[in-house]
Image (cartoon, rainbow, N blue to C red):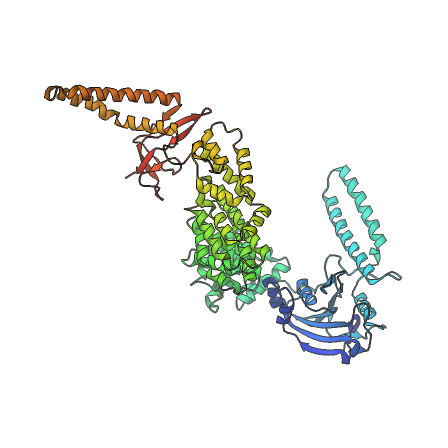
């Protein structure tokens, strides 16, 4: 028996229409596109969903009309005082018919609904939803009224909705026109509030005049739209909500029985905007201490939840974050459970931020694995990836650790689901790498390519858009590692992703990807600049050319862009420039320029100069020490040896004159100890990684091009002992 005043929107549903059947939340997951965030909302905010009534021809004896054949009524028992509208939209999207919702919480009830109508011209049956309209919260035992009188279900649906809309309809005004007018009132009121706020802050007289004129214009528009007749209890920018509960006290938090209760109190305080007063001065430390103490007695597996609470506290600590994060290491006694066990994306992000302040042995592997395990909580994923990169030895090392966790992705059976996850992973990785400023590491290009291949293998026949977006995002990481250290741009290994990526896709698919890609243009610029640098060093590189062929739609496009990029570079040898612009496809008669020593005249002269100079001391000693002895012991051989030594010196002077004519000179680094650079030095026995300092054992040769000196023959070096 009701004890409260009857509400026009609270209907006493006919007994014949009653269903009263509990509907599992999972039913809506099956019939709507539900991501993990939406599932979190269902879990966090919804206790139970009940199908209360079905208004149809067979239950209330009204014929269908205007596309309305049934009206469903659902009751939702809430865990929290408010329900996110995305939950309602999910249920509305899963059911074709119009729905009226009754929300129940703490002895109160609210009726809420959206105007649902067919999408014009859409043969798939999808529906359009307006904004939601709701009554104020009323006691659950408020009186209920009978169904409004109607001749058909279409009219009944409109009259039920009219009881929710806080704006009276004008004579003969259709429901759709009323809703459009209401939307205009809401938009105009928001604009007016914005202008009034700006007017209050404005100091310039002329600007105040302009703003006042705008205010008058908007108020006139509101009057024409009927704003004065709007229910004064209704706020144009939000639905009616329940009265706020009593303020939270510090003692309540400190006396909380467990972490869940403590977190609930913090949530309540933040909703009521009282958290700053609650955490001022020493009270922040007391709350942090309470979290740490409750973690010690909490069941196993709640450490991550405690970390999320600390991360949340740090987010509102206003410059006192270190006071919170300094306690994070105390809550982890072992590796925590998966971050996916937390209820929503915010908790996951806060927990991930807190993890950055631990140095446990399991941290990097955990971050790599969980960054792949997260479905849609991208902010949390970015935090984990940031920890992984910053705490790894280098960018390349962090990417390799991510690749090592690939089993997490392979456990996803659906190829479409996996490729969409991979897309989000690489987009997050690129965003994190953009702010990374540490060491790039050894062979980062190979590390990135291996990561992309392992994540995409077996999913190349899945969602094409997601596949292309995954590779496009990985291009962003490639661009960033070159930005961090341009010397990597000169090595073909850096671009391994391009050559391996082309193998993953068909030639047609790869061409379409290249033509549609935005980031590939930045990669192309790096390749062109690398070619120019190598050419100025009188070098060629067949592997770089092969990479360029994978990065442009056609060889004609490569040649065109190379010619444009080389234009005005007068310090490049014509043979070398010709080699690059013809993509290495030159005949013997065109005297192909090669990267190896001694393939053109200047290199030959330079090599001769080095050899002559290296043996000059020996010949001088032969002339000064051996020839006098031979004149005594073997007078017949002495003149021959003497002529040989003088002839050697004559050849050396001719070589030096020829070198000067060709503008060649030595680097004068012989026997010096220098920093090793594989681009500038030729290592005895081949390149060795990890070598820092080297000793020059054979001088190099430089040539002047257009007023600038470029290395023609690299000094030969060996590791310093």
Vertical position of residue 428 compared to residue 696: above or below? below
Residue nearest the observer in this picture, 26 or 149: 26
Q: Of residues 366 and 261, which is closer to you in this image?
A: 366
Whether residue 28 can be seen here: yes
The residue sitting at the right extreme is 171
User: What residue do we see at 43% from left, 57% from top?
Assistant: 404
| Residue occupying the far left of the picture | 633
Residue 411 location (% of width, % of height): 49, 64
On-image quarter of the C terminus: top left
**Residue visible at 73% across and 48% down in the picture:** 194
Choose between 645 and 420: the one closer to the eye: 645
Residue 571 pos. (x, y %): 47, 27
Q: How many marks?
A: 0
Horizontal side of 134 relative to 458 (left or right) equals right
Q: Is residue 29 above or below residue 206?
A: below
Residue 572 in sight from this viewpoint: no
- In the displayed structure, 476 sits above or below 458; it is above
Measuring from the top left, give residue 416's x and y in whole percent: 56, 61
Pick the quarter of the image with the N terminus: bottom right
The residue positioned 50% from the left and 55% from the top of the image is 384
Q: Nearer the viewer, residue 61 or 512?
A: 512
Residue drawn at (44%, 47%), measured in percent from left and top? 444
Q: Position of residue 629 (x, y in %)?
A: 13, 21
């Amino acid at each position: 028996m009701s004890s409260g005043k009857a509400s026009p929107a609270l209907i006493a549903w006919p007994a014949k229409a009653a269903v009263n059947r509990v509907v599992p939340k999972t039913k809506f997951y099956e019939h709507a596109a539900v991501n993990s965030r939406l599932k979190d909302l269902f879990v966090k905010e919804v206790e139970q969903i009940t199908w209360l009534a079905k208004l149809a021809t067979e239950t209330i004896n009204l014929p269908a009309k205007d596309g309305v054949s049934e009206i469903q009524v659902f009751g939702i028992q809430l865990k929290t005082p408010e329900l996110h509208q995305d939950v309602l939209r999910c249920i509305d999207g899963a059911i074709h018919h119009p729905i009226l919702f009754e929300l129940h919480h703490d002895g109160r009830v609210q009726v809420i609904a959206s105007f649902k109508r067919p999408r014009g011209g859409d043969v798939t049956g999808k529906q359009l939803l307006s904004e939601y309209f709701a009554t104020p919260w009323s006691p659950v035992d408020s009186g209920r009224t009978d169904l409004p009188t109607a001749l058909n279900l279409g009219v009944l649906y409109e009259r039920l909705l009219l009881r929710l809309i806080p704006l009276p309809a004008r004579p003969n005004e259709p429901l759709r026109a009323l809703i459009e007018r209401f939307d205009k009132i809401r938009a105009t009121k928001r604009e007016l509030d914005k202008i009034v706020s700006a007017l209050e802050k404005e100091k310039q007289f002329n600007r105040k005049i302009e703003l006042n004129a705008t205010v008058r214009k908007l108020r006139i528009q509101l009057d024409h739209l009927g704003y004065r007749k709007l229910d004064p209890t209704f706020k144009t920018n939000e639905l009616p909500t329940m009265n706020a509960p009593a303020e939270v006290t510090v003692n309540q938090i400190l006396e909380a029985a467990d972490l869940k209760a403590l977190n609930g109190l913090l949530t309540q305080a933040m909703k009521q905007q009282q958290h700053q007063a609650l955490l001022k001065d020493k009270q922040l430390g007391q709350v942090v201490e309470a979290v740490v103490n409750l973690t010690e007695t909490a069941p196993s597996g709640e450490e991550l939840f405690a970390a999320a609470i600390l991360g949340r506290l740090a987010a509102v600590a206003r410059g006192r974050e270190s006071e919170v994060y300094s306690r994070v290491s105390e809550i982890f006694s072992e590796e925590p459970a998966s971050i996916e066990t937390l209820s929503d994306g915010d908790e996951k992000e806060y927990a991930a931020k807190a993890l950055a302040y631990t140095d446990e042995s399991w941290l990097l592997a955990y971050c790599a694995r969980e960054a792949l395990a997260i479905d849609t909580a991208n902010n949390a994923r970015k935090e984990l990836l940031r920890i992984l990169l910053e705490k790894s030895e280098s960018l390349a090392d962090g990417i390799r650790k991510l690749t090592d966790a690939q089993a997490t992705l392979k456990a996803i059976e659906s190829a479409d689901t996996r490729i969409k996850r991979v897309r989000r992973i690489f987009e997050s990785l690129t965003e994190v790498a953009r702010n990374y400023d540490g060491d790039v590491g050894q062979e980062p290009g190979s590390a990135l390519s291996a990561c992309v291949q392992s994540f995409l293998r077996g999913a190349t026949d899945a969602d094409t858009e997601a596949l292309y977006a995954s590779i496009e995002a990985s291009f962003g990481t490639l661009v960033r590692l070159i930005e961090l250290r341009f010397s990597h741009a000169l090595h073909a290994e850096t671009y391994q992703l391009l050559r391996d990526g082309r193998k993953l896709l068909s030639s047609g698919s790869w061409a379409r990807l290249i033509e549609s890609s935005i980031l590939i243009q930045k990669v192309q610029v790096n390749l062109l600049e690398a070619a120019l640098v190598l050419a100025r060093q009188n070098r060629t590189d067949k592997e770089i050319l092969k990479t360029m062929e994978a990065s442009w739609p056609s060889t004609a496009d490569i040649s065109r862009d190379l010619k444009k990029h080389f234009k005005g570079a007068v310090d490049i040898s014509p043979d070398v420039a010709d080699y690059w612009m013809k993509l290495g496809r030159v005949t013997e008669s065109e005297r192909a320029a090669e990267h190896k020593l001694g393939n053109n005249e200047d290199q030959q002269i330079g090599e001769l100069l080095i050899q002559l100079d290296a043996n000059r001391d020996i010949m001088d000693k032969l002339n000064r020490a051996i020839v006098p002895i031979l004149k005594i012991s073997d007078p017949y051989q002495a003149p021959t040896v003497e002529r040989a030594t003088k002839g050697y010196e004559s050849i050396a002077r001719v070589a030096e004159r020829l070198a000067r004519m060709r503008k060649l000179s030595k680097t004068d680094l012989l026997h010096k100890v220098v920093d090793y650079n594989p681009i500038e030095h030729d290592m005895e026995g081949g390149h060795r990684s990890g070598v820092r300092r080297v000793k020059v054992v054979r001088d190099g040769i430089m040539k002047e091009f257009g007023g600038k000196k470029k290395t023609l023959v690299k000094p030969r070096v060996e590791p310093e002992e």
